Amino acid sequence: MMEQYEASFVRIARGVPDGMELVKGKMRKKTKLVEYFKLKTGKEIEIYEWAELAMAAVEADGMLELYERIRAKTDELRWLNSKKEKEKRLYALECLYGKSYEYWPDFTIIWA
């Protein structure tokens, strides 16, 4: 199940309309930045939506223990300390799906 959510890790960002705002007495369009992942299937999906689907796939495939170990390892990264919890979970999922943990020198993979 995890295979269907493998991203090519191309992040696409777009400004999307987010209502109107009053600036110096004039109404202007307000936009917000939305990030997407492009999946290997070619589909684009919003990154936090991808994280929810990917996490469900991790649980369904029995990879939760490996995810938790990767998530614990990411707590040691100083540059992630100032990030929100959902950013940390997203980074751990990216490491899991991209298999970057295989190249960490002090990380051993234990398969049951």
Image (cartoon, grey):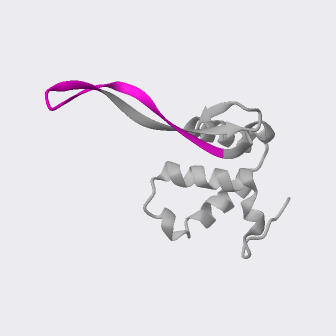
Work out whether 107 lies above or below 97.
Answer: below
**Magenta stretch, main secondary structure class:** strand
Work out whether 20 lies above or below 112.
Answer: above
Q: Position of residue 103 (x, y in %)?
A: 76, 68
* Residue most extreme to the right: 112
On screen, residue 9 versus residue 36, left or right, reads: right
Q: Quadrant of the C terminus?
A: bottom right
Work out whether 47 lies above or below 74.
Answer: above
Work out whether 20 lies above or below 77.
Answer: above
- Answer with the quarter of the image where residue 107 lies: bottom right
Q: Position of residue 24 (x, y in %)?
A: 15, 32
Q: Which residues are magenta?
A: 10-28
- Answer with the quarter of the image where residue 48 lies: top right
Q: Is residue 65 visible?
A: no
Q: Position of residue 65 (x, y in %)?
A: 72, 55
Q: Position of residue 46 (x, y in %)?
A: 57, 35
* Residue most extreme to the bottom: 106
Q: Say which of 74 and 19 sits in front.
A: 19
On screen, residue 24 versus residue 47, left or right, reads: left
At x 62%, y 59%, the residue is 71
